[in-house]
Amino acid sequence: MNVVSEGKAHIRTNEKVFFNPKMSTLRDMSVAFLLAYGCAGKTLLDATAATGVRAIRYYKECGIGSATAIDINKNAYKLCRKNILLNNVDVDCKNVSIQEFANNSDEKFDIIDLDPFGSPAPDIYDLMKISKDGTVLMATATDTAVLCGAHSAACLKQYNSKPLHNELCKEVGIRILMCYISKIAAQFNFGSVPLMCISDMHYMRVFIKLESGAKNAYGAVRFGGIGTFCHSCGRFDFKRGVSPLIGNVCADCSSEVEGFGPLWLGNLYDKGLSLKVAKAQGSRLAECISKEFDTPLFYSVPKMTKRLGLSSISHYKVIEALSDLGYTATATQFDDNGIKTDATAKEVSKCIKALSRSNKG
Ligand SMILES: C[S@@+](CC[C@H](N)C(=O)[O-])C[C@H]1O[C@@H](n2cnc3c(N)ncnc32)[C@H](O)[C@@H]1O
Ligand SMILES: [Zn+2]
């Protein structure tokens, strides 16, 4: 049996229970998030505990008031109990499924961490039963191939949404996940407020605050909508609403467009909180998120130059040129060469063409 140290926790691992040391950066990010959010004295449920590393770290590093760790797997439960003893923390541990636990628990939690194998979708409904006004749900999805459109039919089945399999896929995927959760939450009279959303390596993670009340629930559902993408010129359009009317021909080049969604079209971040997380954790990803212009979708500069038949150009130069023209323009976590801006596809193309000409001159 191995003992791994991560943060302030010492974790026994074995071959029967899931533990991925590479996910430590994501766990660090969650610790930084909880510290920035402020969780002293709050109650936490680690709904998919495995070794118990998250519950133990949150308890030791974030000042959680009381923590419960559950896992459906007997081996995980046994190892989690050992790790709780090893770390001398007051964490309650149960060998139970989310579904059984949620249907029998009187307790409602302030913070819930959900980190399943693959999709979090099947567990959201039950977790709403043990949520309350102000609950923060932190949910990971590792079915990114589904959310990113490699398996379009699977996404329709799992999330009732059509993904987009191109350069925008990660952001569209995270917005599909966010939209799905907000609709389930609304059935329980909760509005969903995204505090932070992350796409990295093979996972996506959303940090959502639930706010009670029919008005909040209705308001959040109205952030859903649909989008279209033009593969000829890179223009995208989106519209909020349950069944909004949106054209099937590109307004710029008259090519037929591809539709996608429903997806979340509201903000993805609480800016103040993202900034605090970036300051505390200092990772490149956290830094990028804290500076990102919070608007749906972006332009991939290499894809734009390719469509225009031009040689590649630094996306930083495009950001600088657009900013000089008075537009808001920033880098994005969703694409190393992407830009988020309030300039239109036509304006971005014009800017890229001008930069390309001056590069040659
Ligand atoms: C990806 S692992 C969790 C890893 C852990 N959070 C970490 O950071 O190391 C997923 C765990 O969820 C458990 N699990 C799967 N379905 C479950 C369910 N319906 N209820 C409770 N636990 C479940 C599995 O047994 C497994 O231990
Ligand atoms: Zn077009």
Image (tube, grey):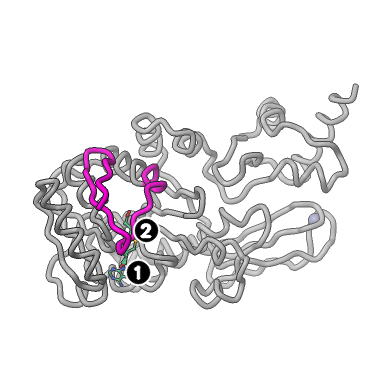
The answer as to whether callout 1 falls within 8 Å of ligand 1 is: no
Q: Which residue is mark 1?
A: 124
- Closer to the camera in the image, 252 or 21: 21
Residue 56: x and y in percent read 20, 49
Provide the residue span drawn in magenta: 1-26
Q: Amino acid at mark 1?
A: Ile
Residue 31: x and y in percent read 29, 42
Q: Is residue 312 left or right of residue 297?
A: right
List the single residue furthest toward the front. 1
Query: Between marks 2 and 1, how big is the CA–CA gap?
Result: 9 Å
Q: Is residue 275 magenta?
A: no
Which image quadrant is residue 36 in? top left
Question: Which element type, helix, strand or loop, lies under badge 1?
Answer: helix
Cβ atoms under marks 2 and 1 closer than 8 Å: yes
**Which circle's residue, 2 or 1, is located before the other in the chain?**
1
Q: Quadrant of the C terminus?
A: top right
Q: Is residue 107 above or below residue 90?
A: below
Q: Amino acid at mark 2?
A: Ala
The answer as to whether callout 2 falls within 8 Å of ligand 1 is: no
Q: Is residue 2 magenta?
A: yes
Q: Is residue 277 left or right of residue 308?
A: left
Which image quadrant is residue 109 in? bottom left
Q: Residues within 10 Å of mark 1 (few under 14, many from 20)?
A: some
Q: Is residue 289 left or right of residue 247?
A: left
Question: Which element type, helix, strand or loop, lies under badge 2?
Answer: strand
Residue 124: x and y in percent read 35, 69
Q: Is residue 259 above or below residue 344?
A: below
Q: Which residue is mark 2?
A: 139
Going 37% across and 58% down the picture, which residue do you hit? 139
